[in-house]
Amino acid sequence: MIRIIIALFLLLFSINVQSQELFVYSEPASNMPAHSLGMRLGSSIMTDRNPLHNTFMITPELMYGISRNLMVHAEGILTDFNKRTELNGGALYMKYRFYSNDEVHSHFRLAAYGRAAINKNPIHQQAIDLNGFNSGYELGLIGTKLINKVAISTGASFVHAGDNAGNKFIYGDNNRNALSYNLSVGKLFLPATYTDYRQLNVNGMIEALCQTNLNSGKTYIDLAPSVQFIILSKMRVDLGYRFPLKNDLSRTMPRTFLVRLEYNIFNAFR
């Protein structure tokens, strides 16, 4: 299993193309430009394991670059878990880049972030997911390195699950805390030579997404390959598929297709 992850990352490293610090399933340590406004609309199509059927989640999101080191996201969560589409929660995310070492052909950046989420869905899985399933909070660190135009990002966070509105966390108070961690690698496949901001950029990336419950020690390890299109340097389309390699930490919907649209307005409030 671990050998599969390593082999896929090495395959991506071996292709001699440029990289982008824009990951689909995780955030890099870099921030969006100051005073910029971003709008996202994500749609996740999930396969429910019990009973077997497809369901979806829609996540509208607003992002704002407060300064070159500080940015904030506000997200809504709409699902059809109860056979009708309804607003089931939301989340607030803030990231602060506190270190940057920029060189000619490389840089290294560190950032701290926090997320707070509320949700009213019934709790039906041991894994803690603040992006649609659980109320709670998350505190974490991200490190991103650019080496010869290859972007590598890793992060780790402490995640705490609260009770959803009217729905208690049923897996025991000792299992409310988890460690989440990830490793992401991305590259730019097109254009081969950059000459104009109007060129279509096509990025490919692979991300390993993991969580371990701090009490039970149960773990999941997901792999998430994705492709990303950047249009006119301000519009973005993400297509990804996330699936488990190890799934000891039970989830009802471990396989997910993701489609996300994003539009950025630079210098929106200057």
Image (cartoon, rainbow, N blue to C red):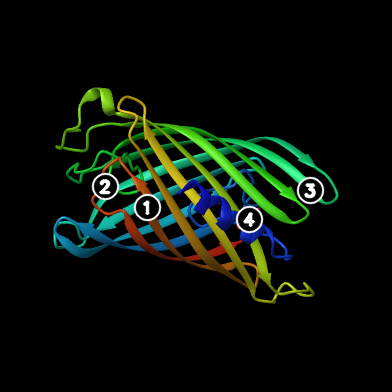
What type is the residue that disc 2 sits on? Arg
Q: Is residue 238 visible?
A: yes
Taking the spot 57% from the left edge, 60% from the top edge, the residue there is 205
Taking the spot 74% from the left edge, 74% from the top edge, the residue there is 192
Taking the spot 38% from the left edge, 34% from the top edge, the residue there is 212
- The first of marks 1 and 2 along the sequence is 1
Give the spatial CA distance, label 3 vs label 4.
19 Å
Q: Which residue is mark 4?
A: 10
Outermost right residue: 104
What type is the residue that disc 1 sits on? Pro
- The first of marks 4 and 1 along the sequence is 4
The mark closer to the camera, 3 or 4, is 4
Above or below for 246 versus 110? below
Tell me whether circle 1 and circle 2 mark residues in contact (CB < 8 Å): yes
The mark closer to the camera, 2 or 3, is 2
Give the spatial CA distance, label 1 vs label 2.
10 Å
Q: Which residue is mark 1?
A: 244
Q: Quadrant of residue 175?
A: top left
- The first of marks 1 and 3 along the sequence is 3
What type is the residue that disc 3 sits on? Ser
- The first of marks 2 and 4 along the sequence is 4
Tell me whether circle 3 and circle 4 mark residues in contact (CB < 8 Å): no
Image x and y of residue 232, in percent:
64, 73
Q: Which residue is mark 3?
A: 106
